[in-house]
Amino acid sequence: MKIAKPLAALIDSFHKLPGIGPKTAQRLTYYLLHVPQAELNSFSEALANLKKDTVLCSTCKNVNEIDPCQICSDKTRDSSTILVVEQPLDILAFEKTSKFMGLYHVLHGSISPLENIGPDELYIEELIRRVKKGIKEVIIATNPTMEGEATAMYLAKKLKMNNPLRGKSEKLKVTRLGMGVPTGADLEYADETTLISAIQGRREL
């Protein structure tokens, strides 16, 4: 039996999302058939406004409604420390702990030769420029995966080469999250206690 075109189109759209297989795409589509039209309209409006009403913070590259974002604009935060993460979702995980009061920088990915993602595809040069403006510590909080570790090693080398405090009595401190986050895990799924321990137990690179 041939599926109606509107259904087939939505199934195909869901199937393109990460982690959504063909069966799940079909279930979601048929579920939405039973949702009141008002809710569907609200859902479609939220999708339509997703990119239209959001911007990348010109400072930290986090996704927000304003530029600069609320965190970068907060004068009470420690502007001498930057915690580097792969994705905006990682910031939400650290903010839930209420223990890190520095600033963030989002790379929007990690170095992955298999996916043709190199340093130039990430917001690394923007990080280097920020560090040159008086940052004292950079905490590298990429995921504990092969790609995350490779990115951390690259960042550490790059930061030390471009160290604005080189030769001075006070040098730039480059650290990596401590143990506690399971190898191969994504930080966005780590619990608050684990993340707090990882920050407190960070090691210098």
Image (cartoon, rainbow, N blue to C red):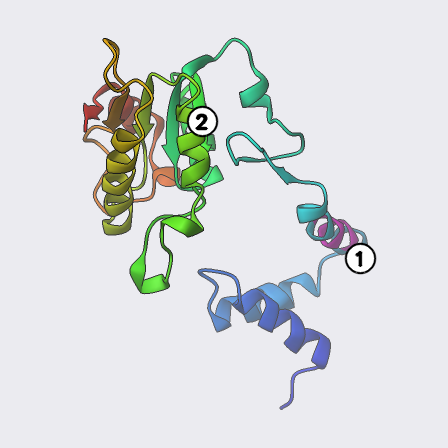
Left or right of 96 in this view: 7: right
Q: Nearer the viewer, residue 34 or 101?
A: 101
For marks 1 and 2, give the one nearer the viewer: 2
User: Which residue is located at x 38 percent, y 32 percent?
Assistant: 84
Q: The residue tagged with tag 1: helix, strand or loop?
A: helix
Asked where in the image residue 34 lies, by quadrant, the reply is bottom right
Earlier in the chain: of badge 1 and badge 2, it is: 1
Q: Examine the rendering and report whether any part of residue 135 can be seen.
A: yes
Q: Is residue 15 above or below residue 159?
A: below
Q: Is residue 162 above or below residue 22?
A: above
User: Which residue is located at x 59 percent, y 22 percent?
Assistant: 70
Q: Examine the rendering and report whether any part of residue 101 can be seen.
A: no
List x then y, in percent, for residue 73.
59, 18
Q: Is residue 199 a member of the stretch shown in magenta? A: no
Left or right of 120 in this view: 175: left
Question: Which kind of residue does numbered mark 2 sit on?
Answer: Arg
Which segment is the magenta one?
41-46
Crowding around mark 2 (Cα neighbors within 10 Å: few <14, some 14 to 19, many 20+) is some
Q: Nearer the viewer, residue 157 or 162?
A: 162
List x then y, in percent, for residue 101.
43, 15
Q: The residue tagged with tag 2: helix, strand or loop?
A: helix
Residue contact at pointers 1 and 2, CB within 8 angstroms? no
Q: For mark 2, what is the residue?
A: 130
From the image, which quarter does the N terminus lie in?
A: bottom right
Crowding around mark 1 (Cα neighbors within 10 Å: few <14, some 14 to 19, many 20+) is few
Residue 37 numbered tag? 1
User: Which residue is located at x 64 percent, y 29 percent?
Assistant: 67
